[in-house]
């Protein structure tokens, strides 16, 4: 199996792939514009990227491409819709960068509270200004509000408790039982969280549902002088609303991500938010530690190995959560050639589409059970043909499923 790696990738991951018999084409300098041509030339089954954009053209460029692995957590840099249309699995490596991002989030929290970058800049300019920086609120005994409850958020919460902070959290899936288990208070809503927090840290994926999740209403509900941290994605925040809050409510912000940030490693950053004196920014480097990149590389290798062995993409992000199937056809049969071909022939002649299926082989490999999800129900006559026309069929059953 051939793997095209179109980004920087840890040597330990390259060595692991080669040691396991994969053909590795390592082209770390590829950009989005050159990627489709590289896929056409290399014709890989697997593509691995980190920050490189994967546009729609990539998914029609290589006829053998079956899997794209994002060596990281977020996958908004990949045209997932185009991948799905071409039957290409997209997988990510969730949780492997959680500690690295959480550490940066806490660095930004501390920078906002103690104005560390400002102090450093003054000292480097030869100015001693202890009077200006002697006043800071401090974190112990204050409240941290956490938006989202993925692996990064959990790592942030763990560290908040070590700082002696109370934690209030919001997630659509947060139950009272889970909140108690984590030692956090569950916010009734995003606005409730904003109103209760001295520091807010955002940890949600970039989706259509989370675009501008943090808007004017949220900022207006925040406490005067509160700290706002975003290490997720820039699209989650309405930057103009945040700027308004900074200027009218004395908020401070620690931001690792910005809306419209350059996709390449260097470039010009549009917008004025990062230039604001009360904003402490970093260059979308939350996951950029040696520890995190090693863990991500090894997880990417595990995904690729599992895909070769089973055809299953671990952490697949574009598998349909619910198929349009209306019924389940269960066929118990002898484990012989042609049995399922006969079943599919009957279904094809009836104009019935197979949505999903699995064929379970029983111990000894003498018999199997095919569970076939269909878009419409076969007629009694179709079922009789399946039962009667093949002597290797042991049993046929039809069950309604779906809504």
Image (cartoon, helix red, strand yellow):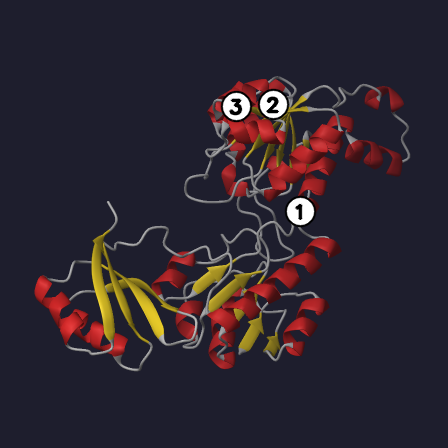
Q: Nearer the viewer, residue 42 or 403?
A: 403
Cα gap from disc 2 to disc 3, whole angstroms: 26 Å
- Closer to the camera: disc 2 or disc 3? 3
Pointer 3 or 1: first along the chain: 3
Q: Position of residue 56 (x, y in %)?
A: 41, 63
Q: Position of residue 122 (x, y in %)?
A: 84, 33
- Closer to the camera: disc 3 or disc 1? 3
Q: Does the rendering let one see residue 347?
A: yes
Cα gap from disc 3 to disc 1, whole angstroms: 26 Å
| Mark 2 residue element | helix
Res. 233 image quadrant = top right
Badge 2, how many Cα within 10 Å: few under 14, some, many 20+? few
Q: Position of residue 37 (x, y in %)?
A: 48, 75
What residue lies at 33% left-to-right and 77% top-to-bottom? 335
Badge 1, how many Cα within 10 Å: few under 14, some, many 20+? many
**Left or right of residue 140: residue 185:** left
**Residue that carries the numbered disc 2 in the rendered image:** 247
What residue lies at 70% left-to-right and 30% top-to-bottom? 160
Q: Position of residue 351 (x, y in %)?
A: 14, 67
What residue lies at 45% left-to-right and 39% top-to-bottom? 211
Res. 361 image quadrant = bottom left
Check residue 286 in the rendering and tell me which mark sits there, or answer none: 1
**Residue that carries the numbered disc 3 in the rendered image:** 187
| Mark 3 residue element | loop
Q: Does the rendering let one see residue 281?
A: no
**Left or right of residue 61: residue 377:** left
Pointer 2 or 3: first along the chain: 3
Confirm or deny contact between disc 2 and disc 3 (CB under 8 A). Answer: no
| Mark 1 residue element | loop
Q: Nearer the viewer, residue 322 or 256?
A: 322
Res. 162 image quadrant = top right
Confirm or deny contact between disc 2 and disc 1 (CB under 8 A). Answer: no
């Amino acid at each position: 199996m051939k793997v095209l790696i179109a980004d920087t990738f840890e040597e330990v991951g390259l060595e692991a792939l080669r040691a396991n018999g994969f053909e590795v084409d390592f082209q770390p300098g590829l950009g989005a514009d050159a990627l489709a041509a590289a896929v056409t030339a290399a014709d890989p089954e697997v593509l691995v990227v980190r920050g490189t954009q994967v546009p729609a053209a990539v998914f029609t460029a290589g006829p053998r491409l079956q899997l794209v692995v994002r060596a990281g957590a977020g996958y908004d840099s990949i045209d997932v819709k185009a991948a799905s249309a071409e039957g290409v699995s997209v997988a990510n490596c969730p949780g492997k960068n959680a500690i690295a991002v959480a550490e940066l989030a806490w660095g930004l929290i501390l920078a906002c509270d103690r104005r560390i970058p400002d102090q450093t800049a003054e000292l480097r300019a030869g100015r001693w200004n202890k009077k200006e920086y002697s006043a800071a609120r401090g974190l112990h005994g204050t409240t941290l509000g956490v938006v989202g409850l993925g692996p990064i958020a959990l790592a942030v919460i763990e560290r908040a408790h070590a700082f002696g902070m109370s934690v209030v959290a919001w997630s659509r899936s947060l139950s009272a039982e889970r909140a108690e288990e984590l030692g956090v208070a569950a916010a009734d809503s995003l606005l409730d969280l904003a109103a209760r927090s001295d520091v807010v840290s955002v940890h949600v994926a970039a989706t259509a549902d989370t675009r501008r999740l943090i808007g004017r209403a949220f900022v207006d509900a925040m406490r005067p002088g509160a700290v706002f941290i975003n290490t997720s994605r820039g699209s989650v925040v309405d930057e103009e609303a945040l700027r308004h809050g900074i200027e009218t409510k004395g908020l401070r912000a620690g931001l690792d991500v910005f809306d419209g940030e350059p996709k390449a490693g260097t470039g010009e950053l549009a917008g004025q938010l990062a230039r604001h004196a009360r904003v402490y920014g970093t260059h979308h480097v939350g996951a950029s530690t040696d520890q995190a990149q090693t863990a991500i590389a090894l997880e990417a290798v595990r995904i690729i190995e599992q895909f070769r062995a089973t055809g299953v993409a671990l952490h697949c992000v574009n598998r349909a959560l619910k198929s349009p199937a209306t019924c389940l056809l269960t066929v118990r049969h002898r484990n012989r050639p042609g049995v399922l071909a006969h079943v599919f022939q009957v279904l094809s002649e009836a104009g019935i589409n197979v949505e999903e299926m699995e064929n379970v082989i029983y111990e000894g490999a003498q018999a199997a059970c095919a569970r076939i999800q269909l878009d419409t129900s076969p007629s009694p006559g179709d079922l009789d043909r399946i039962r009667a026309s093949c002597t290797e069929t042991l049993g046929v059953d039809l069950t309604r499923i779906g809504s």
